[in-house]
Amino acid sequence: MIQRIQSLYLFLAFVAVVLIFIFPLAEFSGTGVHCVLKVTGLKYFPESVQPVFVNIVPLLILLPGISLLLLISIFLFKNRVMQLKLVKVDMILSVVFIILIFGFSEYLIGKNIPGIEPVLYRAGSYLSLVNVVLLILASRRIIHDDKKIKAADRIR
């Protein structure tokens, strides 16, 4: 399982998704307020600022789903067709997650909090892009392995 390069790509994608939980997605600064957007919520500094309600439930639902699909697909190394389907679904969910990150940061937060400067994207946003790249690489290697095995079966 570990010898296959796509398993390594999938494991690295899983690590990237776990790190998204830790690192902030974006930061906002304005007149007297500093906000940090994480998957777990929007944090204000100083804490005395009246918080703006931002619904981050889609982020909280999507990210554990992405990580669960990655774990399942790592252990489906014997069933390449199912592994490829799960990786493609995970890729679609990861792209939706990226769209939600940019949608939350630009539209919901930038418009609702007065005096906010442009958004500064942090490590969490870039790790989600790394996740998509690793999923693309893993799917290409799964397809490559499938073609190799079909060619070997044809020779017999």
Image: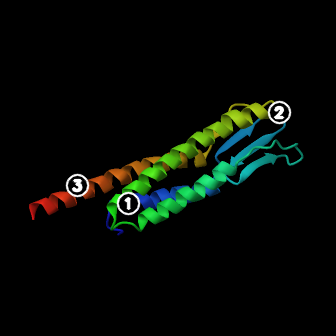
Q: Tell me the residue that label 2 is attached to.
A: 31
Residue 43 in the image, given as x and y percentages of width and height:
77, 49
Q: Secondary structure at mark 3?
A: helix
Q: Residue visible at 48% across and 60% down?
A: 70
Q: Residue visible at 16% across and 57% down?
A: 151
Q: Can see residue 119?
A: no
Q: Nearer the viewer, mark 2 or mark 3?
A: 3
Specify the amino acid type for callout 3: Lys
Q: Secondary structure at mark 2?
A: loop
Q: Residues within 10 Å of mark 1 (few under 14, many from 20)?
A: few
Dividing the picture into quadrants, the one containing residue 28 is: top right
In terms of depth relative to the viewer, which is nearer, 70 or 133? 70
Residue 140 in the image, given as x and y percentages of width and height:
33, 50
Q: How many marks?
A: 3
Specify the amino acid type for callout 2: Thr
Q: Nearer the viewer, mark 2 or mark 1?
A: 1
Residue 152 in the image, given as x and y percentages of width and height:
15, 61
Image vertical order of residue 75 relative to residue 81, above or below? below
Q: Tell me the residue that label 1 is attached to.
A: 82
Disc number at residue 147?
3
